[in-house]
Image (cartoon, helix red, strand yellow):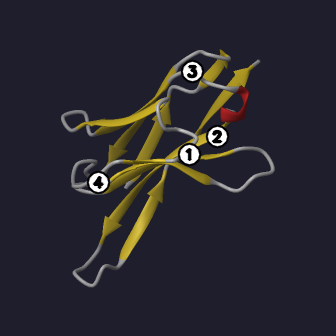
Amino acid sequence: VQLVEAGGGLVHSGGSLRLSCAAFGGSVSGNAMGWYRQAPGKEREVVATMPSGGTIWYADSAKGRVTISRDNAKNTVYLQMNDLKPEDTAVYSCSMTVVLNVEGANFRAWGQGTQVTVAS
């Protein structure tokens, strides 16, 4: 599985960005997808998750400002971010969790990440 993110950049407070995560070797509709971020000096934290079936989940910091979605035809997951704030500055990475067997063994593939910088 290979995940390739794009769409990061520099924006000012209140701006918007749409990140994309193209998947190769795995299906975004058949596996759980997620967006995470890691700011300098901080641990990686989850932003939003989208199971193959079920309820989408957002971190409290993302609710109302962020939307995760997928395009099955393009095998791509998106993260639309609005009203960005300086504290949203981080490297954003997408993940795909692939279940290997009925016992639930799985592995998680990661993309290389894309930098989002929000200037005040």
* Residue 13 vertical position relative to residue 39 in the rendered view, above or below: above
Disc on the earlier residue, 2 or 1: 2
Residue located at (37% from left, 62% from top): 97
Q: Nearer the viewer, mark 3 or mark 2?
A: 3
- Which residue in the protein does label 2 denote? 91
Residue located at (61% from left, 16% from top): 14
- Which residue in the protein does label 3 denote? 83
Residue 26 is tagged as: 4
Residue farthest toward the bottom in the current orientation of the protein: 103
> Identity of the amino acid at label 2?
Val
Quadrant in the picture for the C terminus: top right
Give the spatial CA distance, label 4 vs label 1.
16 Å
Give the spatial CA distance, label 4 vs label 2.
23 Å
Disc on the earlier residue, 3 or 2: 3
Residue 112 is tagged as: 1
Q: Secondary structure at mark 1?
A: loop
